[in-house]
Image: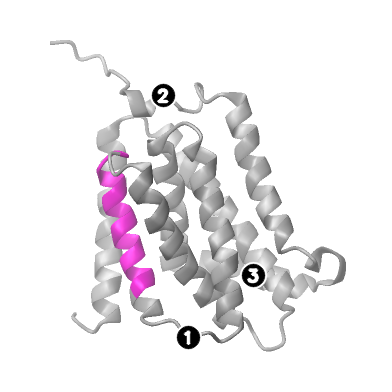
Amino acid sequence: ASDVYQIPVYDTYLVAQMRPELIAKFHTTLFVALLVSHPAHAAGSANSILSGLLHPILGFDHLMAMVAVGLLSIQLAGRHIYKLPACFVLVLLLGAIAGLGKIPLPQVEGIISVSVFILGLSIVTGGRVGALIAYPIVAIFAFYHGHAHGAEIPSLANPAAFIAGFMAASAILHLLGVSIGAITRKPSTRALLGAGCAGVGLHMALLTYGLV
């Protein structure tokens, strides 16, 4: 048996192999998504944008989920590399509006923790979870993450600027996940990363519900 690593079908969109037009579409789609929530560009506050940028990064559960979505997208391959993160960012906006409007949503913190666990498990499958399952899961989790962001907007912050900031940070974290997925070529390495993500998510979920 040969020891040469064979790249499987779903692993064809690595850094050196991803088609330039897909990369361009990825950036363009996320940029358009950010513009939807970006009236703060003209009238917003720099402090609010900065606070929004830091919010997903300083929240470890948010950070893990965003990176996981990017890694999952490259496992699904093809156009999903930009469509799955774009789906997350757009639904994130809807969730933020709901949170800002004080629309109640049950088990927000618990579902956010569970999202890290489920996304990690999805990565372990090597993309075999499939797009028909991945998109609804990602959309549900995005809404919950967005709701948490929107509900926690500081009282003195410019809401539009804050939302634009955390949407931009989310897009950047998605790109980080895509980059990690492109660099880690072996499915076993990606599966290990997914398992680590799932383990962290499970621990956070247990802590959230007071089970540990």
Under circle 3, the secondary element is helix
Question: Which numbered dot is residue 104?
Answer: 1
**Residue 90 locus on image (x, y percent):** 58, 58
Q: Which residues are magenta?
A: 111-127
Q: In this rendering, is residue 28 above or below 32?
A: above
Whether residue 152 is visible to the viewer of this picture, yes or no, is no
The residue where tag 3 is placed is 52
Q: In this rendering, is residue 179 above or below 92?
A: above
Is there CB contact under 8 Å for labels 1 and 3? no
**Residue lying at 50% horizontally and 21% vertically, measured from the top left:** 17
**Residue 196 locus on image (x, y percent):** 28, 53
**Residue 161 locus on image (x, y percent):** 73, 70
Q: Residue furthest front?
A: 132
Q: Nearer the viewer, residue 157 or 89?
A: 89
Q: Amino acid at mark 2?
A: Thr
Q: Residues within 10 Å of mark 2 (few under 14, many from 20)?
A: some
The mark lying in front, picked from 1 and 2, is 1
The residue where tag 2 is placed is 12
Q: In this rendering, is residue 140 above or below 109?
A: above
Q: Quadrant of residue 25?
A: top right
> Considering only order in the chain, which callout, 2 or 3, is on the residue closer to the N terminus?
2
Q: Amino acid at mark 1?
A: Pro
Judge left or right: residue 59 versus residue 155: left
The mark lying in front, picked from 1 and 3, is 1
Q: Mark 1 and mark 2: span between their CA atoms?
A: 42 Å
